[in-house]
Amino acid sequence: MNYKLLKHQIESQGFNLNQIAKKLNVSRTGLWQSIERETLTVQTLEEISKILKVDPRLFIDKTDIHPEALPLPEVQELKDKYVKVLEENHELRQKH
């Protein structure tokens, strides 16, 4: 799972962990530990993705799935472009 992208997506949408934790009805500390220790459950990832209004598969790394289940190159290319746009958006927001 791409935890760096998950953190970035949370921040870029203007959320913080406290807000996400409240929406999930869990403690901020517990959520933070799950993310930092990279032990987030699939169910929690799906719930966070609903809050962020993104597909949870966005956060799945190639190494998390079997090689025969890898997305088509075109899909991966679009995902890479999306991540780049998110990063650029985040940088622009930090400048202002």
Image (cartoon, rainbow, N blue to C red):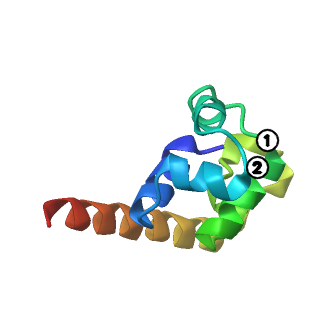
Percent position of residue 57, x then y: 71, 61
Three-letter amino acid code of the residue under disc 2:
Thr
Q: Which residue is mark 2?
A: 44
Count up the numbered dots: 2
> Would you identify the image quadrant in which residue 47 lies?
bottom right
> Would you identify the image quadrant in which residue 49 lies?
bottom right
Q: Is residue 7 above or below residue 83?
A: above
Q: Is residue 9 above or below residue 39?
A: below
Rendered image: mark on residue 41: 1
Confirm whether residue 73 shows in the render: no
Confirm whether residue 16 shows in the render: yes
Three-letter amino acid code of the residue under disc 1:
Thr
Q: Nearer the viewer, residue 68 or 36?
A: 36
Percent position of residue 91, x then y: 24, 60
Query: Marks 2/1: CA distance?
Result: 5 Å
Rendered image: mark on residue 10: none
Asked if the residue under mark 1 is in contact with the one under mark 2, i.e. CB atoms within 8 Å, the reply is: yes
SS at mark 2? helix
Instruction: Give the left or right position of residue 46, taking residue 4 as reference.
Output: right
Q: Residue at x 76, y 58 (%)?
A: 46
Check the picture and name the quadrant holding the C terminus: bottom left
